Image (spheres, rainbow, N blue to C red):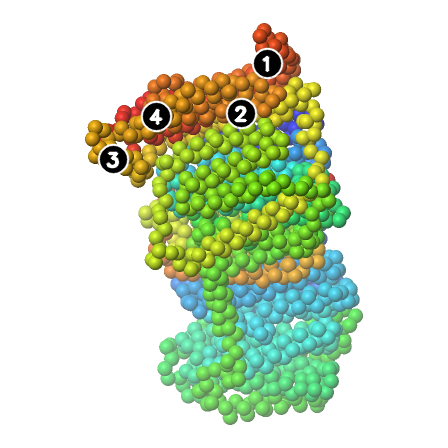
Amino acid sequence: MDFSTSLALIAPELVLSLSGLVLLLVAAWAGDRSARVVSVLACVALGAAFALCIPVVSGGLAGPDRIAFDGQFRADAFASLAKLMIYAASLAALILAPAFLERIRSMRAEYPVLVLFSAVGMSIMVSATDLLTLYIGLEMQSLAAYVLASFVRDNTRSAEAGLKYFVLGSLASGILLFGMSLTYGFTGSTAFDAIGVAVSGELNTGALFGLVFVLAGLAFKISAVPFHMWTPDVYEGAPTPVTAFFASAPKVAAIALLTRVLMEAFGGQVEAWRQIVVFLALASIVVGALGAIGQDNVKRLLAYSSINNVGFILIGVAVASTQGVSAMLVYLAIYVPMTIAGFVAVLMLRDGAGDPVERIADLSGLSRVRPAVAWCLMIVMFSLAGIPPMFGFWGKFVVFQAAVQADMVVLAAIGIAASVIGAFYYLKIVKVMFMDEPAGVIEPAGGQPGNASLGALLAICTLMISPFGFLATGWLGALADRAAASLLLLA
Amino acid sequence: MTDSRILLLVLALPFFGSLLSALLPRTARTAAGLVAGSVAVLATALLIPFYAPVARGEIVRLEIGWLPTLGLDLVFRVDGLAWLFAMMVLVIGALVVLYTRYYMAREDPVPRFFSYLLAFMGSMLGIVLSGNLVQLAFFWEMTSLFSFLLIGYWYGNRAARDGARMALIVTATGGLCLLVGVLLIGRIVGSYDLDVVLASGGTIRSSPLYLPALILVLLGAFTKSAQFPFHFWLPHAMAAPTPVSAYLHSATMVKAGIFLMIRLWPIFAGTDAWYFIVSFAGLATLLVGAWAAIFQHDLKGLLAYSTISHLGLITLLLGLSSPLAAVAAIFHTVNHATFKASLFMAAGIIDHESGTRDMRRLSGLARFMPFTATLAMVAAAAMAGVPLLNGFISKEMFLAEALDARGGPVIGFALPVLATLGAAFSVLYSLRFIHQTFFGPPPTDLPKVPHEPPGWMRRPIEILVIACLVVGIVPAATIGPVLQSAVRSVLGAQTPTYSLAIWHGFSAPLLLSMIALATGTLAYFRFRDALNRRAGPPVIARFKGGRMFERVLADIVRRARSLEGLFGTRRLQPQLRLLVCLACLAGLLPFLQLGYATGGLPVTPLDPAFAVIWIVGGICAVGAAQQAKYHRLASLVLMAGAGLVACISFVWLSAPDLALTQLLVETVTTVLLLLGLRWLPKRQPEVWPDDRPPARVVFRRSADLGIAIAAGLGAALLAYAMLTRPLPDTISRYFMEQAYPQGGGRNVVNVILVDFRAFDTLGEIAVLAIVALTIFSLLRRFRPASESIEPPVQQRMQDAADLHAGGRRVGDTKKDYLLVPRIIMEWLFPVIFVFAIYLLVRGHDLPGGGFAAGVAMSIAIMLQYMAGGTRVVESRLRIRPLRWIGAGLLLAVVTGVGALAFGYPFLTSWFRYLELPVIGKVPFGTALFFDLGVFLLVVGATALMLVAIAHQSIRTPRARTPARPDVPPVIREEGED
């Protein structure tokens, strides 16, 4: 494999890292005055990286041609589809930030740079085909994320969120590393395909230990139950644009990474990990649904909802077939705009003093104060509950279908029972917004800075999860199918 | 010929109308009504031509390719049954629209109402016209959603809000069950296409997944059609505006469940499971609904329970599994839709014109509204099953089927009796509805003076009642062919011969019918006063589904909250504990599953001395962890001890190069930490009420100790198991073998660093430089917290002693106490410097190298700082860390680029031995320059960090009273300018 070919394959990552480094220097010299410019340039870089991934996805490229650096990295359609979602979500995080951070005078030029570095890390994660590449990507993403969580550093909640995320994340990272070294020790390789060869046939005890710890470490990253404890705290404490980012892009990356590890490295031992994944899925669905009930803060509620969604996504992983992976990708593609729309809507609500509103009780009668936001939030809630005609239904449907096709009926049934509990709570929010008397906390729309871009983002995301989303099902399904096929091609 | 594409138009029209209506201004009642009405009429007109092919037994299909990979195509199909239901949805829809226009108050936002109503109508049409089960389930959930909006239309009313939410949760849950049921059917059949599914009844019934699929589908149907025990949402939905009730609870919504059961009857019916589940649910619903209806005082409540009861009747018929019963079920579905819609509308008129729906207050209304009274009476008679009306004919068929039911003597006897009982109840409540409302003395305390409604508001009822009459008198000529085509589309070859006529001669069903009529009438006149006094139905009053539902929901909320209170925590420590415990558990699981086995490698016997060293190291490590909470300095010293043991281990295991590096790194880190420790705030000592920690704390700490031991032991066991297995073939052998031939060095670590992996090293030293810069810039503006400024206790004591002793000034002791070490260290400085150079030069072959040399050099500088103090050192030495860093980095890069100049790849090294005078033969390679770069950079980086920390001592502290006279001026720091 030629060095320049490898470089060509990592073009999106190169674009992002180089722009990140250059922008870091710009930020260092020009200071926070350049925050806007740096943000715009970071958006351009993300857009370029996005464009570079499109041909790979639409062409469904796969196979040995897409392997870079002697099997360390693979830029196939699966990775590129995940990258598209990651870049789009990062773009949203950049667009969201100024409106929130500038008001509290915390908009710094480092923010877009950190998002860029995080995006590079996630890119590497989804393309990793070696434990070491995996770890580098994961840590790169995580380190940027720790800083982002505590970005508003004079706010104690934000600082606490960052510290908690860092301490717990490091511990999880240690567990993951331990699992990786065990895997290496027992299989003799860090490359996914070589591990796959080593564990095919009879299950090696040591490799199973490694697998369990790797799964535990990754479960933390996707905040699957029982490794979810940090999620509500960090989501609540982190600045809302950062929370929107956390709930979308890193989830995609970690899930894609998990899928690749399971399907490629441990694809020969599906029975060994399926029960673990099924457990994670069910626990996440149930705890996510039940946990949401007790919340009176919208961000905590959305945190639990993301836990719940991860459970559904894991059903697709547990199916362990092309169909399952495809369903998982479709779910992710719906989940990302859905969750971003939720956070954008929350971000747009301000009280009289201009402070963000996060309490559910304060949403009372929102339909009369901010009708447009209320309608969008309603679509988000119905979509989260999976009620047709909202597009969220489609995600649940494909996942359930994959589960039923794989004869995992009980899994689907429990998933349904839990989504009913979840639906109950999402409906309560709709009720509060549309049927209760206005609480008088939220200000009507006014000349708040940055509202136009927020509004546009909200409109786009809502449109994607509205019934119009169904127009894209064929196209989305074909892309996901091809991506899933590319993942399993060499496995 | 009809174009199947028109079907799409029929389906799309209501949704377009809905959008259009939503865009109308709030007050545009008439315009919205016109939109809705014309949509309904137009769709009806478009659908009518389909009757011709349908009557011939054809199925009109429209397929739109969508997702062939998932087996999903959009299929719209119309056959007899679908046509019948679609017409019902549209025609009754049109009548409801007309009625709504006059029913709604001026201040209601009517366009929104029509928008919801049309969307609901479209969803309902979607259900009946779907030719694909997934699509059906989709529209099914949409009806749940829009019924939620319709029921909650008057959201100012709490009952409406709660009723809407309850209806949505119950029916949407059922919808999800249906979805999975459908997926199961798809799994069995391999297709979701309705025609394919209907053709594979045998496959489905013999499949092991039959029962789960059946139960899930029935859960969907039962929740939607308000079957016992899910019937409770329907009465609560009565908080909706009356047109909504008239529409949802006659022809649509609740009929969706019935439709589904009829649709899937050919594939599901005929098994015992179907027979028992469906018949039992139907029978229970029939009786419970009828019994509860008797005791209602609210007109709409009575109609709601009677709806439940009639739905139960239809379900029971379907459960009986005989083709004739299925015919009766279809027929009764149509009849019920007709009379129930008119009754709801009549109840709405009564409410509208008299201001109340309470039957105990209403009386003698026939005088005020004779037309409405007549219409209501006819419709109620149809509900009671009085001859000459449509309800009579289908009820006859029902009783006949009840008599024919299979299933042993008990069922054979019980079913007719219970069916007759249900019929009698029906007569009773119908009579009560009519008699109490329209007959008797004029009402006394009504909110309004009752009068006839506007003529157009009555028109829909008139049309429906005429239909009841016509069908009741000449059934075969009117409904006959339509019914026949619907029946044939369901039953196909099984279609029985039946006759629709009001007179079949004196037969057992007729007898039962008469008994029911008589019993019902007698019972009403016997018990009517008692009925009016009762607050709720006896026997089943205890079972309040709605309240139980609310209670269950409240319970879930409470439990979920308490669960979160129990298991959720926002504190970091429990979260960490949980994470470690889970990791232990995760490690334990495969252990339990597969057992523990060490590998086959022979184990080297343990040298006792080595073991002692490790025990000491272990104790140091544990002590460091323990002391971290109480005494940071002790903890640091212990940590250094553990590090030292690691160094000794390396020596022991014949890795002197590693040992040397480790030793130097240990020293540097310890010293840097030590310097930093000075500026951390002191730990607060623990203060407990009675001088020792309470049991809770002791327990927690012991538990933590246990967890730590378990985790450590687990990790050790795993590592042991791994180490006793043969090592994987690693790259280290290659390095061992090639270090000398290719890199010209015998110190493999150094050769790897400066030659094989020089590129990595270049990156690493760059990172090291960045880290040093970062630390420097972070600490540059750092001012120690004021509580850390206090001189240490020892110093204060010495100062106090100086003060009191004669001939000494304060600070003398401080100045002198390190005199001897200071001189020693000053003398040592050149020695260490030479030692560092020695390490650097010999590094390629023997333990040492640029990194080790750099660290050694840093130690020399550090010792100067520690012994002499910042100002003394910096007044004598020129510490220029930034230049060193820059020079080192530059040198390393230049060395690499040099290779390019000779046509080799970046960082290729060149190596030979040089004969030097005096010294003799020495190895020489370009790698040495690279190593020198590393050396300079390491010295620079370490020194920079040192400067950053050391300068704290000479800086004005924060938050102190300004300008303490004894604080020296801040000296110039490199890097700050």
Image spot of residue B576 (x, y percent): 50, 50
Q: Which residue is mark 3?
A: B801
Q: Earlier in the sequence, mark 1 or mark 3?
A: 3
Q: Which residue is mark 4?
A: B819
Say what secondary structure mark 3 lies in: helix
Distance between mark 3 and mark 4 Cα atoms = 19 Å
Image spot of residue B119 (x, y percent): 55, 59
**Residue at left 72%, top 66%?**
B210
To the question of a shared chain for discs 1 and 2, the answer is yes
Q: Amino acid at mark 4?
A: Leu
Say what secondary structure mark 1 lies in: helix
Q: State the residue lying farthest toward the top.
A: B917
**Residue at left 61%, top 36%?**
A133
Q: Earlier in the sequence, mark 3 or mark 2?
A: 3
**Residue at left 58%, top 21%?**
B843
To the question of a shared chain for discs 1 and 4, the answer is yes
Q: Residues within 10 Å of mark 4 (few under 14, many from 20)?
A: some
**Residue at left 57%, top 80%?**
B288
Q: In the rendered image, which quarter contains the C terminus of chain B?
A: top left
Q: Earlier in the sequence, mark 1 or mark 2?
A: 2
Q: Amino acid at mark 2?
A: Ala
Query: Disc 3 vs disc 2: Cβ atoms closer than 8 Å?
Result: no
Looking at the image, is A188 positioned above or below residue A284?
above
Q: Can you tell which quarter of the image residue B760 is in?
A: top right
Q: Earlier in the sequence, mark 2 or mark 4?
A: 4
Q: Residues within 10 Å of mark 3 (few under 14, many from 20)?
A: some
Q: Amino acid at mark 3?
A: Ala
Distance between mark 1 and mark 2 Cα atoms = 25 Å
